Image: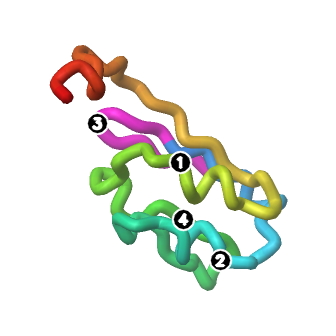
Amino acid sequence: MQVTCEDVRFEVDTERCCGCKICIRKCMEDVWRWDEENKCATPKYPDDCVKCYQCEIYCLGNCFEIVPLVVMKTDPLENQ
């Protein structure tokens, strides 16, 4: 399954999802929801993703990938 928004694409392998729901708990922006029909986590609010990658890092089944579609135009550390 693929979900694409303005600046990020979520690629979810529904067959590999083990149902641990860690991605849902780790997401600070509340992007992920459990899809009861497909028995896997899905990005319900992809536009709210801040690309912290915590969900992807902690995924036990390594079943999805977050692909940024827009390259950052400024260095976030530049204005410190």
Q: Callout 1, which amino acid?
A: Tyr
- Mark 4 crowd level (few <14, some 14–19, many ≥20, 10 Å Cα): many
Q: Which mark is residue 15?
A: none
Q: Nearer the viewer, mark 3 or mark 1?
A: 1
**What residue is disc 1 on?**
53
Query: Residue at point 71% right, 60% down?
Result: 59
N-term-proximal mark, 2 vs 1: 2
Tell whether position 7 is magenta: yes
Structural distance between the alpha carbons of marks 3 and 1: 17 Å
Structural distance between the alpha carbons of marks 4 and 2: 10 Å
**What residue is disc 2 on?**
21
The span picked out in magenta is: 1-9
- Nearest the eye: 69 or 78: 78
Residue 47 at x, y percent in the picture: 29, 51
Q: Nearer the viewer, mark 4 or mark 2?
A: 2
- Mark 2 crowd level (few <14, some 14–19, many ≥20, 10 Å Cα): some
User: Disc 1 on helix, strand or loop?
Assistant: loop
Q: Callout 2, which amino acid?
A: Lys
User: Disc 2 on helix, strand or loop?
Assistant: loop
